[in-house]
Amino acid sequence: MKKLILGATGSIGSSLAKKIVSDGGEVHLTGRDETSLSALASELNASFTTCDVLEENFSDKIMNDLGDTQINGLAFCVGSIDLKPLKLTKKSDFMQSFNLNLISATEIIKSTSDNLKKNKGSIVLFSTVAVKQGFPNHA
């Protein structure tokens, strides 16, 4: 069984993937940058899917690549930071953040829920350090 890691080329996602593999586990990696993703997958002898969680039906692509592979873990390590003063933010800034952090997370959870339930799997959703510590211009 594999752990599915979204945002695998970021610092948290890649560190998590390396830890899982060093502990004898298997991973399926996802990310937007095919070059970085392919290199990490090669290093870890892992399968991967190149996709952008902001694209419609991105989870279908992941599930298609997984095929019959059973997963018992999902780590959502996707995120971004958009630093600008509140007066410069637009509705589209907030909508993109909402789509990235909530909608895409629920989309992949819905797509993997049966597989995870069957395998008594776990879901981990990573957030931002700004939850505990605010940043200037982090509207």
Image (cartoon, rainbow, N blue to C red):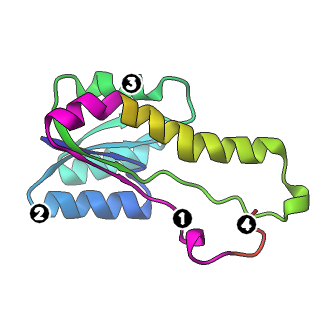
**Residue kind at label 4, given as amino acid type:** His
Query: Mark 2, mark 1: which one is toward the viewer?
Result: 1
Residue 12 occupies quadrant: bottom left
Image point 8% across, 57% down: which residue? 24
Residue bearing mark 2: 23
Among numbered discs 2 and 1, the one appearing first in the sequence = 2
**Residue kind at label 2, given as amino acid type:** Asp
Label 4 element class: loop
**Residue kind at label 3, given as amino acid type:** Lys
| Image-based side of 11 in relation to 81, left or right | left
Spot occupied by residue 49 in the image (x, y as percentages of width and height): 35, 34
Label 3 element class: helix
Spot occupied by residue 43 in the image (x, y as percentages of width and height): 23, 54
Near mark 4 (Cα within 10 A), the count class, few <14, some 14-19 or many ≥20, is few
Near mark 2 (Cα within 10 A), the count class, few <14, some 14-19 or many ≥20, is few
Label 1 element class: loop
Among numbered discs 2 and 3, the one appearing first in the sequence = 2
Residue bearing mark 1: 128
| Image-based side of 39 in relation to 58, left or right | left
Among numbered discs 3 and 4, the one appearing first in the sequence = 3
Residue range of the region highlighted in magenta in the rendering: 111-134
Near mark 1 (Cα within 10 A), the count class, few <14, some 14-19 or many ≥20, is few
Rendered image: mark on residue 104: none
**Residue kind at label 1, given as amino acid type:** Thr
